[in-house]
Image: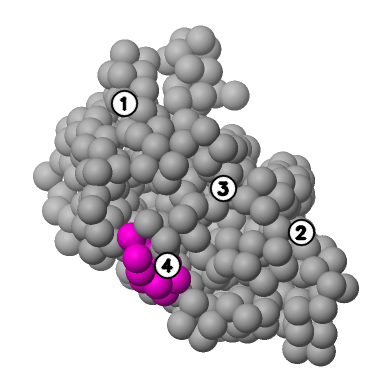
């Protein structure tokens, strides 16, 4: 692949990875509007977020193994086409039930971009080059859920919530057209010839027999659930409890995004000297401490004005830690499974969004009268992730990544 084509492919992969998080989170500032317009409850609207994450997880389980068998481009284009149609369906939906149905389909369609992008990176890179590339994709994966509400809040200045979904449909159309003309097939020909006869069951078997992969994938799902506990409750917490406007809420997301961006880019440099398994331990512990601090402040101060500063500061630290955690999970999950990279990426994504979709609405069911329910769910998820690291992954047993194969593209 020529250098120019490589750059185009990398940029396109970032845009495709961003489609999923934007699909999930772009409408978060519109939650109060959906409650009013559809005459429903806060919990019902939060369930539409759950529907999308579950659809995203299920879609990855289909698209990933399919891309290992037939190549990357066809599953990518067809899945993104489903996303466009589902986005139009949500924009025209007359009730919350119909919104929920099309949100599931939106998630299934958006899954193509995320899982195929990670598989393409694994097709093209290995070793330390893989670490660098996955760190860049992790930056998009982490920033997109945070920046999407900021973009959504500004869209709501000129559009209603239905217009937000028309914008998502436009994003999908642009992605389909660009992928059609700019992305080439990256799955190696020798792998396509030699491995296309393997079944999905065989590929899943190789993954689930790998203790490190299983532990890291579960850790990723638990950590992503902690992030989504924040994302699913933040609109109600900051707008209804602390009285911020939709634009102030979006600005807050933008500020927090700096922490995640700093963490992600620092992680790529630190992993040159420190194994990603050790970053999972250190950054996970700091995120746990910051989440507990938010919970204690909410328990002691309730919704007093001073607690807002503690909540914002604590979340900044948590998101900076996620910047270390997400690329570390992706590197450990994909570095040793190049032959089934699509399937590995699908399992990773399915657990991330499946667990997040199931667990994050717990905050809404508990009630969002302060930051305490959000912090309690985050602490629980992060504690379980640390238990998984030290009992299943066992950092001392993880092989050195630099011993892996030479990258297909030299960088």
In the image, residue 127 sits, relative to residue 334, either above or below, namely above
| Residue 358, horizontal then vertical, whole percent | 39, 74
Query: Does 155 appear in magenta?
Result: no
Q: What secondary structure is the magenta-colored segment mainly? A: helix
Give the quarter of the figure containing the N terminus: top left
The residue carrying mark 3 is: 149
Between marks 4 and 1 in the image, the one whose residue lies nearer the viewer:
4
Q: Is residue 327 left or right of residue 284?
A: left
User: Dot 2: few (<14), some (14–19), or many (≥20) neighbours within 10 Å?
Assistant: many
Q: For the residues marked 2 and 1, what is the alpha-carbon distance in whole angstroms?
A: 34 Å
In the image, residue 143 sits, relative to residue 241, either above or below, namely above
Res. 11 in view:
yes
Q: Are marks 4 and 1 in contact (CB under 8 Å)?
A: no
Which region shows up in magenta? 38-49
The residue carrying mark 2 is: 316
Which secondary structure, mark 1? Answer: helix
Query: Does 46 appear in magenta?
Result: yes
| Residue 402, horizontal then vertical, whole percent | 60, 46
Of label 2 and label 3, which has the lower sequence position?
A: 3
Of label 4 and label 1, which has the lower sequence position?
A: 4
In the image, residue 249 sits, relative to residue 13, either above or below, namely below
Q: Which mark is residue 288?
A: none
Which secondary structure, mark 4? Answer: helix
């Amino acid at each position: 692949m020529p250098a120019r084509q490589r750059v185009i492919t990398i940029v396109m992969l970032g845009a495709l990875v961003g489609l999923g998080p934007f699909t999930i989170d772009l409408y978060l500032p519109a939650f109060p509007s959906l409650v009013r317009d559809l005459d429903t409850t806060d919990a019902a609207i939060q369930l539409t977020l759950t529907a999308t994450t579950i659809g995203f997880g299920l879609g990855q389980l289909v698209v990933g193994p399919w891309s290992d068998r037939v190549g990357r481009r066809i599953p990518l284009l067809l899945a993104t086409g489903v996303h466009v149609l589902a986005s139009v369906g949500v924009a025209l939906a007359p009730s919350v039930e119909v919104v929920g149905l099309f949100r599931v389909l939106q998630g299934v369609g958006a899954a193509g971009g995320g899982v195929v992008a990670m598989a393409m990176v694994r097709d093209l890179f290995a070793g330390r080059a893989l670490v660098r590339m996955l760190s860049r994709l992790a930056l998009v994966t982490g920033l997109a859920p945070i920046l999407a509400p900021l973009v959504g809040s500004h869209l709501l200045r000129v559009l209603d919530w239905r217009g937000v979904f028309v914008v998502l449909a436009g994003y999908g159309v642009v992605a389909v057209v660009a992928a059609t003309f700019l992305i080439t097939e990256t799955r190696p020909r020798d792998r396509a010839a030699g491995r296309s006869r393997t079944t999905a069951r065989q590929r899943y078997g190789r993954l689930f027999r790998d203790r490190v992969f299983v532990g890291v994938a579960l850790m990723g799902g638990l950590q992503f659930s902690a992030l989504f506990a924040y994302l699913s409750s933040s609109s109600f917490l900051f707008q209804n409890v602390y009285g911020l406007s939709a634009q102030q809420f979006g600005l807050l997301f933008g500020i927090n995004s700096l922490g995640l961006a700093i963490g992600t880019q620092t992680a790529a440099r630190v992993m040159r000297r420190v194994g990603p398994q050790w970053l999972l331990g250190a950054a996970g512990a700091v995120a746990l401490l910051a989440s507990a601090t938010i919970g204690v402040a909410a328990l002691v101060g309730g919704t007093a004005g001073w607690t807002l500063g503690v909540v914002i500061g604590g979340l900044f630290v948590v998101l900076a830690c996620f910047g270390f955690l997400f690329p570390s999970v992706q590197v450990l999950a994909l570095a040793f499974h190049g032959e089934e990279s699509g399937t590995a990426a699908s399992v990773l994504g399915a657990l991330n969004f499946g667990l997040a979709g199931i667990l994050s609405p717990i905050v809404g069911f508990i009630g969002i009268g302060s930051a305490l329910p959000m912090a309690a769910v985050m602490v629980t998820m992060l504690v379980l992730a640390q238990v998984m690291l030290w009992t299943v992954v066992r950092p001392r047993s993880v092989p050195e990544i630099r011993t892996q194969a030479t990258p297909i593209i030299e960088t």
